[in-house]
Image (tube, rainbow, N blue to C red):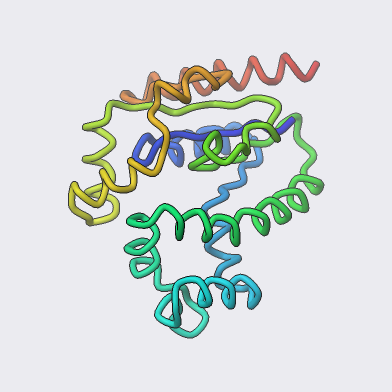
Amino acid sequence: MVVGLTGGIGSGKSTVADMFHNLGVPVYIADKEAKKLMERSDDIRNKIVELLGEQAYDGYLPERSYIANIVFKDKHKLSALNAIIHPAVKKHFHEWYKAQKSPYVIKEVAILFETGGANECDYTILVTAPEEDRIKRVIIRDQVDREVVLERMNNQWPDNKKIELADFVINNTNLVKTQQQVTTIHNTLLAKRK
């Protein structure tokens, strides 16, 4: 089974993904793999340079802050960038998935519902947290100001829209309770495989 894991920026998707990993579940982090593909694929690099200009790369390394400054202010450029990266990540995921031997895998994707990626999952898990907590987490993690975080949040669907679509919802405000929710979902998913 493929279980999609998603949540808005700063919700704690990575923390939850680590908890599943610690339970022995193979975890695919789409953003990390996308970054690797942006560095390794000449085809992706050429398309991004064509879209955003030579400054999008320093040699073979993407200039992430330059790219983010453009795409989070221009929905058309963000959509075009996603159209370059998402098909490559999708192909890479399928190759990775074929090599797994566990009852299910976690595919962590920031914009799972927004891109229709949930349709390729057997189940979906949404990680939520209060907006102010999320903003504070991202400010600390990414060393950016509040306006930058809000700009990024505006490119994602609000939680109330995603809650209606998710099979499971994890409220990530207390790590002990989050771990309990992860364990419960893990056991439920294992039972569905029997």
Question: Which is nearer the eye, 170 or 165?
Answer: 165
Q: Position of residue 138 (x, y in %)?
A: 28, 46
192 sits to left or right of 51:
right
Instruction: Tell me where residue 7 sits by quadrant.
Output: top left
194 sits to left or right of 48:
right
Q: Position of residue 47 (x, y in %)?
A: 58, 72
40 sits to left or right of 163:
right
Q: Position of residue 58 (x, y in %)?
A: 43, 82
Residue at x-position 36% and y-position 64%: 70
Residue at x-position 52% and y-position 37%: 114
The residue lying furthest to the bottom in this view is: 59
The residue lying furthest to the front in this view is: 76
Determine whether 162 is above or below 15 in the image: above
Question: Which is nearer the eye, 115 or 15?
Answer: 115
Determine whether 120 is above or below 187 in the image: below
170 sits to left or right of 90:
left
Q: Position of residue 41 (x, y in %)?
A: 64, 73
Residue at x-position 40% and y-position 80%: 55
For the N terminus, the quadrant is top right
Residue at x-position 33% and y-position 41%: 153
For the C terminus, the quadrant is top right
How many numbered circles are shown?
A: 0
Instruction: Tell me where residue 159 sits by quadrant.
Output: top left
